[in-house]
Amino acid sequence: MTTHHKHRVSLGDLRSQRWFASEDIRGFAHRQRTQQMGLRREEFMGKPVIGILNTWSDASPCHAHLRDRAEAVKRGVWQAGGYPIELPALSVGEVMVKPTTMLYRNFLAMEAEELLRSHPIDGCVMLGGCDKSTPGLLMGAISMNIPAIYCPAGPMSNGRWRGQITGAGTHTKRYWNELQTGAISKDDWIDLESRMTRTNGTCNTMGTATTMTSIADAMGLCLTGASSIPASDSGHPRMASACGERAVAMVWEDLKPSDILSAASIRNALVTYMALGGSTNAAIHLIAMARRAGLSLTLDDMNAMAEKIPVLVNLFPSGSYLMEDFYFAGGLPALLRKLGDHLDGSAMTVEGRCLGEAISGSECYDDNIIRDLNNPVVPLEAGRTLVLLRGNLAPDGAIMKTSAADPQKLQHRGPALVFDSPAEMAAQINDPDLDITRDTVLVLRNSGPVGGPGMPEWGNLPIPNKLLKQGVTDLVRISDGRMSGTHYGTCVLHVSPESAVGGPLALLQTGDTVILDAHAGRLDVDLPMQELERRRQGWSRPVSPYTRSFTALYQRHVSQAHEGCDFDFLEGTDPVPEPSIY
Ligand code: FES
Ligand code: MG
């Protein structure tokens, strides 16, 4: 078994000591101002400093317990002989932040990196979990490359309404559609508001939050299995305390993200992503994370893994259970163990031992919730976590999650109905005279990284009420935006290049015939090249109303979906010099 062999670091090597051990006037100020907070010299001198990046805020129910968890982390740090300092970071709470948290993922990544760089920090524990907080914090930590451990917020507990399971996101959409058809009443809908989400914590379905925390865990960036512990379980603060303790040891071992991330950990990320039936959002975040680490990863790599690994985790939206069930069934370690040789057990983890060793004692307690490879939730022929599409509508790729789509619609030919904005779509979608049938291909453009801006989760385009009343529950839908991982439907997403930068989606017109063949990996419009070229002559790039501040920076520097939507100046492994302390 592989273990981490790095020599132990001595106190004088720690970056914090440039602040605290310095004999000049600056050193005096750093010690004086720390004592100003009521700390004795003995309590912080000569100790590794552990930064706790906390994405708690009153605007994120998923992270509402993280103030308490930071205290648990501190307990672990103190007991291991470290000095903890907690620093607030942007919470990017999925529910409240508009137009989309994705616009701020890179902002959080920059914030995380710069908080670590500009402070006297030797190692860190990062508290996050709601969708973009995981890649944001991890991208920052990867670029800063000091010992770092991820402490996931944990999923909220299971929900029930009138005896029926309710999962965050998935059932919101389901009951919303039932409200439209009259299957539930307005009073029922109001009652649901207070019933669906019982505790703090991240979405309990296989949405982006659980997908990303589970993948981070499988990549060795969490204490192994930490991502499955429900937020309200007493094991959660115990895990947080253990993160604090372990972070101190990681500093002495000099165990950094660059020692953990490798081709093997990327492979493990992909195997896990597919077995989870994970969110399409992961396809963007994983590429961005890999590029930060200087590792290669493409949509083709993901597609190749998706062809091999079926959905094994029986959670909504691909399956029928919730995260608490997954935890009781053995959680992520049980899943990883079932992946057998597909997993590279030699990959390093924050525990200082390899993944194979970390999961060796794990067991599965419910083979229905965590399936065996020969008994998947969705057989590969019926649906996959990810299907990569290319064609004259998506030269650089588009993706869909066929495990959460209508199998009848995976090969489809139909007339396009194109909208330029969600507002335009909302104004017309329920017009009784709208020319739309169950064969229509609904298209939304200007929802990409530049066009959205921030590539909002608009891709689960609404099904018109008149079709819902006819019993239509799915349509082929196409956009250059994203979709919530908790949602289901035949939604082609992340079309690249996006329409706002001149991708072919910009040239599509209502009435054009669109051909989707998910089995063949194709997405095309039935038009000759010359016609698309003719239309391109008449196209001009939309004028952005964003001329200043973060959004202007974002639109100037963001890459396309297939490249991870990072900023061009943040990719790669070029070192940034340590700050001067004079
Ligand atoms: Fe935060 Fe779903 S809204 S995890
Ligand atoms: Mg989400």
Image (cartoon, rainbow, N blue to C red):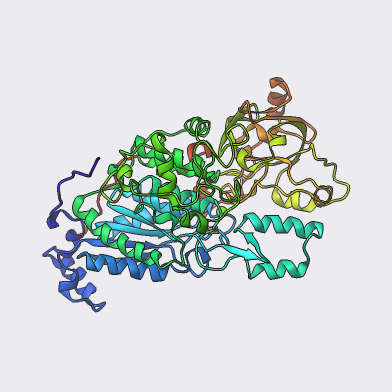
Give the quarter of the image for residue 510. top right
User: Considering the image in quadrants, where does the C terminus appear?
Assistant: bottom left
Q: Is residue 29 left or right of residue 244?
A: left
User: Considering the image in quadrants, where does the N terminus appear?
Assistant: top left
* Viewer can see residue 539: no
Ligand 1 is found in which quarter of the picture?
bottom right
Q: Is residue 345 left or right of residue 498?
A: left
Q: Indicate the position of residue 104 as horizontal and vertical percent values.
A: 50, 54
Report the number of discs: 0
Q: Indicate the position of residue 416 as horizontal and vertical percent values.
A: 76, 36
Seen from the viewer's position, the closer of residues 539 and 10 is 10
Q: Which residue is at the far left?
A: 23
Q: Which residue is at the far right?
A: 433
Q: Indicate the position of residue 485 as horizontal and vertical percent values.
A: 57, 49
* Viewer can see residue 346: yes
Residue found 74% across the figure and 68% down from its top: 188
Q: Indicate the position of residue 43 as horizontal and vertical percent values.
A: 18, 72
Q: In the rendered image of this protein, does residue 270 appear above or below residue 15?
A: above
Residue found 45% across the figure and 42% down from its top: 272
Residue found 28% across the figure and 60% down from its top: 119
Residue found 16% across the figure and 68% down from its top: 45
Q: Is residue 227 left or right of residue 169?
A: left
Q: In the rendered image of this protein, does residue 388 appear above or below residue 580?
A: above
